[in-house]
Amino acid sequence: MKINLNDHEFSIVWDGVYYKALKDYPNINQWELKSIQEFIRYENSYNRSVVFEVEDETLKKSLNSLLVKEYSSVHIPEKISECTACKQKGCLTKFLCHTASYDNAKKIISSDKLLSAIKVGNKSRELLLKESRNAANDPIDYFEHIMFSWGNCQAGDRLVMERKLGRMPDERDLSSEFTPGIRFYFKYNDLKKHPYAVNDGYHALKIKDELILSDYLFALVVPVEYKEAIHDVLPETIKDKVHYIENSCIDIWEWSDVVYNYVNNIE
C-alpha cells in the first residue's frame, strides 16, 4: 500500500493508494500523524508494507522524524477538517453512522445485527473481490468489517444511490432524484469501546464481523415513506430509538445536514 501525501481535496483509499488529505497542507498535525500510524499498523497486521509518496520536500524530509514519535494519546478533535464537502465544512466526530438501503435496513433491523459483507452474504472472499462494487480494488479484509462514516457525512447515502443505480450518481441523482437511505447512528465514544472495534487510520471506525444493534444504537433515522414497513419489523429493544423524517431537502448535502442536526438535538 502507498500513502500519497499531497494537496488532496479529501482522503480516499483507491486501488492500493491512500490519498491522504491534510487540513493545512503541507503542514501536518498530530491527529493526522496518529491516523497515519494507525494505517501503517493496520496494514502491517495483514502483512502489507507501506511506502510514502510525498511531493513537498520539507514534509518529505520531516516525515520520518515525526513518525518516530508516538501519537496514541492524541485525542480525536471535535471536527476533522480534511474534507470540507459537508455543510459544517468538516467531519463532526460525536456520532458514527452506517447507512443502508431500504431492503438491507429491513434485514438489519429484524435481525438486530449489522454484519460485515462476508457475514451477510456468505460469499467467498474471492467472489467479493471480483464484484463490481469493489471498484476501488479494496483488499479482502475490508469485507470482514462493518464500515462507519462520521455522523454528518453524506458518503453513506451516496453509496446507497450508487448501488441502486448501478453506476456513479450524477448531480441530478444527488438532488432532484435523490432518495435517502436509512441511517443507523451510534455515539463514537460508545462504539470505540466495542471489543472488535478497529482503527485503520482511514475509516472513521470499523467493527469486525458483527454488531448487535440494541447494545449500541443511539438513533435510527428512517425517511417517512418507509414508516409503515419499517415499523412492522422493529424489535421492542430499539422501538424507542426510531425517528421518522420527511425528506423535503433539495439535495443529499441538505439532507445530511438536516438529519445530523436532528440527531444531535435528541439529547
Image (cartoon, rainbow, N blue to C red):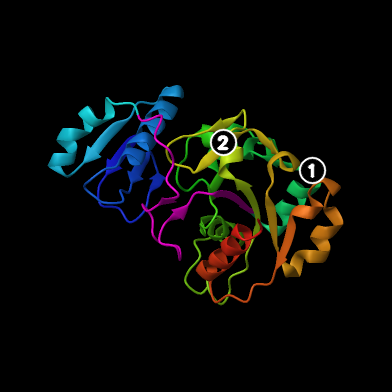
Which amino acid does the dot numbered 2 rest on?
Lys
- Main SS of residues in magenta: loop
- The quadrant in which the N terminus is found is top left
Relative to 209, residue 150 above or below: below
Earlier-in-chain disc, 2 versus 1: 1
Q: Quadrant of residue 197?
A: top right
Residue 112 in view here: yes
Residue 182 belongs to the span the image colors magenta:
no
Residue 168 horizontal side relative to residue 15, left or right? right
The three-letter code of the residue at mark 1 reads Ser
Kindly identify which residue carries mark 2.
192
Q: Which sits in the foreground, 227 or 115?
A: 227
Determine whether the residue tagged by mark 1 lies in a helix, strand or loop: helix
Viewer-side label of 2, 1: 2
Q: Which residue: 39% across, 42% down?
A: 15
Q: Between marks 2 and 1, how big is the CA–CA gap?
A: 22 Å
Q: Which residues are magenta?
A: 71-99
Residue displayed at 47% across by 48% down: 135
Name which quarter of the figure residue 224 lies in: bottom right
Q: Quadrant of residue 131?
A: top right
Residue 185 numbered tag:
none
Q: Quadrant of the C terminus?
A: bottom right
Residue extending farthest left = 57
Reading the image, the residue beneath label 1 is 111
Q: x and y percent of residue 175 in the render? A: 53, 74
